[in-house]
């Protein structure tokens, strides 16, 4: 008997031999067992995944003795004829060479004749997408209502080229790419039967190069046996097919993650000198970073197609960068891959892509700055640059005026440009313009006067605070103080301890307490505020503050409520609390202004906010155009207004 290649010698003979297509095998077995057989089937999948083999096995089950049955004998004479393509009742047609209307008309005329030996007459058309539109239309009526003794089985790698009217008349089965681990295990089994020593790493390398096709993997193993004889190692696979080992790809990825530009360029140089195809090497590198992303999301799924050694390296590398950094690297390498396909100097583009990947890992995005500011740890910024180090005070200054938002329950700070606060009652003389007197009056307010002034406190807060300190932990927060008092004190404490987060908290509405949960509602327009408060650092801070106020562990439930109205955000005034120079004031109010300033300063001191300073220098013009300030304005939904 002449020599048979592995792809034909070890072709599946029964349903149990089909690997990696459990969903298809199970459906066909159940259909046979329950006698729920359709008249037309369509097998879709990449090359070498078992479309033709599955169709032949299905035909054997339908035409077996005492069939249809799933427990047929693969060594039966009729089964052997079907496997070898010699059965008169199972016709295999090549769609590429029989794609015309005349061939379909001939098929339609032969359909009416009954089978000679089998129970069914089966037509198997491979690469059915090669049929012309006229041939498809000629087949429509016969395919929709064939005789009872006829079954159609179609196979294709490009279902998008088949008419929808054909697909709608068939039961479609999508065959998937076979996982690398299954291919490697089957190759080791074949090597054992052939008395060939196949290294496990070599089996994984073959499976990776086969890209999910079992037939390709068996053909590669057949070629390696002819090249190496009875001993096959991973290096043999890499030398014969020009593949790059998984360890080499992982080593290059580690150099990039460690910002080791020299080591990364040396790895590219070594692979290029070894004659490896750089385009495939880059594709393997992109696939490796994709595996790191999958590892962060689903560790079990990431390890399916990896050898044990590479799997351990993937686990370690997935902790060296966050998801955003890995996505930037993948995007950059994908652009390089697109340029390399048409470039003559592929190594140049590869090296530039590696350098750009290292630089992208050193970049700090505005979200990193905001996260660091929210957590109160400026040192948490990764690889800070001088520009980023200057960002926190700029962002903080732009956000500070939000502290005076009038949503807090305590006495409001004198912030708005009111004619005069009712502090000192005096007879009301005729109003006189004192436009130029306001700034000197503010400047004369001495700092010591603010320090000596008694520290007023809002009436509800000391009572609630006293109750919190004196009361023991209870089950319901409502027993300590009302929801309004709790929310007022909670917002005040957020404003004092974490000013940058107060605008997000003020956007929320306290919907109520459950036993251990505080439920906050946000309008649909404030979804960003809700998402910002759901960050781990913010949740930890809010829960700790709530536990401090209530005396027990509390959880927060943050929901979007369409019934809540959107807040009207105040403009951020860089002049803080300055009075306009042209505003007319009564003389008595002008005289009482210093005392009013002291009271406002005391109130500002109570809220741990800096008192208004009329002599604050106006920031330079570059301040308004700074990208970080622009990002902060988008984040806080405000706009900058020049002072004065």
Image (spheres, rainbow, N blue to C red):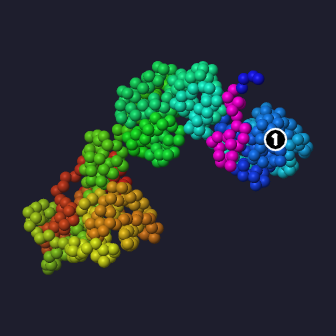
**Residue 271 visible in this rendered orientation of the protein:** yes
**Residue 578 visible in this rendered orientation of the protein:** no
Give the quadrant of the C terminus: bottom left
Residue 607 versus residue 89 in the image, above or below: below
Is 13 on the left or on the right of 386, as rendered?
right
Q: Which is more toward the observer, 44 or 623?
A: 44
Is 243 on the left or on the right of 363, as rendered?
right
Give the residue displayed 36% in from the left and 35% down from the top: 258
Give the quadrant of the N terminus: top right
Q: Count the numbered circles shown.
A: 1
Give the residue displayed 43% in from the left and 65% down from the top: 559
Judging by the rendered image, the residue that carries numbered circle 1 is 123
Is 87 on the left or on the right of 357, as rendered?
right
Q: Which is more toward the observer, 580 or 395?
A: 395
| Residue 19 is a magenta residue | yes
Q: Position of residue 482 (x, y in %)?
A: 31, 77
Residue 542 versus residue 8 in the image, above or below: below
Q: Residue furthest bottom?
A: 427
Give the residue displayed 14% in from the left and 63% down from the top: 442
Specify the segment rendered in magenta.
Answer: 5-26
């Amino acid at each position: 008997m002449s020599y048979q290649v592995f792809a034909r010698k070890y072709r599946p003979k029964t349903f149990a031999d089909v690997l990696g297509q459990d969903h298809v095998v199970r459906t066909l077995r159940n259909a046979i067992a329950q006698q729920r057989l359709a008249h037309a089937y369509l097998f879709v999948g990449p090359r070498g995944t078992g479309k033709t083999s599955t169709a032949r096995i299905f035909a054997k089950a339908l035409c077996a003795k005492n069939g249809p049955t799933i427990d047929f004998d693969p060594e039966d004479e009729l089964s052997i004829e079907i496997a070898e393509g010699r059965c008169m009742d199972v016709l295999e047609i090549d769609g590429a060479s029989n794609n015309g209307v005349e061939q379909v008309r001939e098929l339609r005329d032969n359909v009416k004749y009954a089978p000679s030996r089998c129970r069914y007459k089966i037509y198997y058309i491979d690469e059915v997408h090669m049929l012309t539109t006229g041939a498809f239309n000629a087949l429509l009526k016969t395919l929709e209502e064939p005789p009872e003794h006829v079954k159609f089985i179609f196979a294709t790698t490009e279902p998008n080229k088949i008419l929808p009217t054909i697909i709608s008349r068939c039961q479609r089965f999508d065959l998937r790419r076979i996982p690398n681990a299954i291919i490697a295990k089957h190759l080791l089994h074949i090597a054992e039967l052939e008395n060939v020593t196949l290294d496990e790493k070599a089996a994984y390398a073959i499976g990776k190069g086969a890209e999910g096709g079992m037939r390709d993997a068996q053909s590669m193993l057949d070629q390696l046996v002819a090249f190496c004889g009875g001993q096959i190692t991973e290096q043999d696979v890499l030398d014969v097919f020009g593949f790059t080992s998984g360890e080499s790809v992982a080593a290059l990825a580690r150099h990039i993650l460690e910002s080791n530009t020299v080591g990364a360029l040396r790895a590219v140089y070594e692979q290029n000198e070894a004659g490896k195809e750089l385009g495939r090497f880059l594709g393997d590198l992109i696939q490796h970073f994709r595996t790191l992303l999958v590892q962060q999301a689903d560790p079990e799924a990431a390890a399916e197609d990896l050898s044990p050694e590479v799997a351990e390296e993937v686990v370690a590398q997935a902790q060296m960068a966050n998801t955003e950094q890995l996505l930037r690297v993948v995007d950059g390498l994908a652009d390089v891959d697109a340029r390399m396909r048409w470039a003559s100097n592929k190594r140049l583009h590869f090296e530039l892509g590696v350098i750009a990947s290292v630089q992208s890992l050193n970049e700090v995005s505005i979200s990193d700055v905001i996260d660091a500011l929210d957590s109160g740890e400026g040192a948490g910024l990764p690889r800070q640059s001088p520009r980023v180090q200057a960002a926190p005070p700029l962002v903080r200054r732009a956000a500070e005026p939000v502290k005076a938002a009038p949503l807090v329950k305590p006495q409001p700070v004198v912030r708005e440009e009111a004619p005069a606060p009712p502090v000192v009652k005096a007879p009301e003389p005729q109003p006189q313009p004192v436009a130029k007197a306001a700034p000197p009056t503010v400047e004369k307010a001495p700092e010591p006067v603010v320090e000596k002034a008694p520290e007023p406190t809002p009436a509800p807060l000391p009572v609630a605070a006293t109750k919190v300190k004196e009361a023991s932990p209870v089950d319901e927060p409502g027993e300590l103080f009302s929801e309004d008092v709790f929310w007022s004190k909670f917002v005040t404490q957020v404003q004092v301890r974490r000013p940058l987060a107060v605008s997000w908290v003020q956007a929320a509405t306290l919907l109520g307490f459950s036993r251990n949960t505080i439920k906050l509602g946000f309008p649909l327009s404030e979804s960003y505020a809700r998402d910002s408060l759901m960050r781990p650092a913010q949740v930890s801070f809010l829960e700790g503050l709530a536990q401090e106020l209530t005396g027990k562990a509390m959880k927060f439930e943050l929901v979007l409520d369409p019934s809540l109205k959107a807040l009207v955000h105040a403009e951020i005034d860089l002049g803080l609390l300055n009075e306009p120079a042209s505003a007319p004031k009564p003389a008595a109010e002008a005289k009482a202004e210093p005392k009013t300033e002291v009271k406002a300063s005391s109130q500002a001191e109570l809220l741990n906010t800096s008192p208004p300073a009329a002599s604050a220098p106006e920031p330079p013009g570059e301040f308004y155009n700074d990208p970080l300030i622009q990002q902060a304005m988008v984040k806080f939904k405000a706009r900058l207004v020049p002072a004065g």
